[in-house]
Amino acid sequence: MPRSTQTDLAVLAALSIEPMTGYALRDAIRVHLGAFWSESFGQIYPALARLRADGLVAADEGDRSGSNVHSLTAAGRARLVELMRETPTSTPPRNGMLLRLFFGSVLGAAACRELVADARSQALAMLDHLATARRATEAEPDHLPQRPYWLMTISAGEHSARAAIAWADETLATLDALPD
Amino acid sequence: MPRSTQTDLAVLAALSIEPMTGYALRDAIRVHLGAFWSESFGQIYPALARLRADGLVAADEGDRSGSNVHSLTAAGRARLVELMRETPTSTPPRNGMLLRLFFGSVLGAAACRELVADARSQALAMLDHLATARRATEAEPDHLPQRPYWLMTISAGEHSARAAIAWADETLATLDALPD
DNA sequence: TCCGTCATGTAAATGGTTACATGATTCG
DNA sequence: CGAATCATGTAACCATTTACATGACGGA
């Protein structure tokens, strides 16, 4: 029965904050959830069509001709709560960097250094992005019910990024001490 | 040209340590790379057939009738190095727990607490698993070229799990202080 | 006028899991 | 013998990305 419930959940949840076009939806997901979620147009538009057909979202004419601003219906909000209550499924992990590092003796210490240094700078960039997001979120009004939850997910990213940096520093030191 | 290079890489890399059957391959990946990689039979067997056809691995009769022990050929080792040098691609993130927490005001603080508590105990279990892996790896002979690299990836898991636990503790405290 | 952005969608290919079918071997 | 495990594979399905086609609108 569960036909791509993951995407449905993300779409319904995003629309619960604010009605949007499919285009804006993708942008909002990229900007606000980018650290832990992603959707492509090829997922979003079919999902919106399906949800529309099921009466879970309604499409109103937007400013531009041909643009559809989607909003949650009552049924859509009920479905959202239902999907939210399902236990989260995590996609099987696939970390190409760690896979390569595990077999690092094939690659040599120098190439591994590069791998880890890249991961470090990615974490640094993530930290920077999160700092911006944190400032923006902290500027939201105190009474906004979403605010504390947004800050929690930002904090999750920060913890994870800081851990990645600490690990990278430790690992770069180890690699420097390796022969080869 | 790249036809499922991710699986090919994992398979060739694993076979570079030791010749194995497809069954053992899946098990080895699950046990040793489980924290950051996964492959299913539906991937492994077609991959082995393809690699065999391309002359990258050779199949010898195993102990049991019908079992095929695969080992790297010279061409396979060359291909492995080639794949290792490609820049690692990371699968787009999809963290169902954080998605739900971001929209936590739909769910309520109590349900969010559960979500975070589950994540915490998963991280704890991971830490436990990594402790076992660390002991086993540290027991390997000092001169084993893979040993330092294995320890690096174990350390990555440990950093990540500890960060998850610290975040969960902080977040549980925040959730307790929330009304609703 | 032309470019960049906003906007909607489709088609093809890929990547991957799950479930199933089949059978040998080992061990209690 | 019967159950668990080892072992190989296939088929169906699902999820997802990528690339493409199309066009409206705003501003330099």
Image (cartoon, coloured by chain):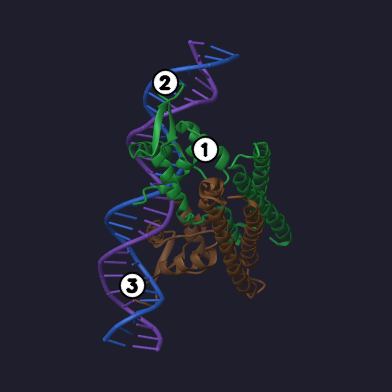
Chain colours: A green, B brown, C purple, D blue
> In this view of the protein, which residue sits in the foreground, B32 or B161?
B161
Query: Label 2: few (<14), some or many (≥20) within 10 Å?
Result: few
The vertical placement of B96 against B142, above or below, is: above
The chain letter for the residue carrying disc 3 is B
Task: Specify the amino acid type for callout 3.
Answer: Gly
Q: Is residue A107 left or right of B55 when viewed as pictured?
A: right
Q: Chain of mark 2?
A: A
**Residue A64 vs residue B49, the one in the foreground:** A64
- Secondary structure beneath dot 1 equals helix
What residue is disc 3 on? B66
Q: Are marks 3 and 2 on the same chain?
A: no
User: In the image, which is nearer the foreground, mark 3 or mark 2?
Assistant: 2
> How far is the residue under mark 3 from the one under mark 1?
58 Å
| Structural distance between the alpha carbons of marks 1 and 2 | 24 Å
Residue name at image x 47 percent, y 61 percent: B11
Q: Quadrant of residue A180?
A: bottom right
Identify the residue position indicated by label 2 in the image.
A65
Tell me if D10 is positioned left or right of B175 in this view. left
- Camera-nearest label, 3 or 1: 1
Q: At x 44% / y 42%, what residue is drawn? A: A77
Q: Which residue is mark 1?
A: A17
Chain under disc 1: A
Badge 3: residue crowd in 10 Å (few <14, some 14–19, many ≥20): few
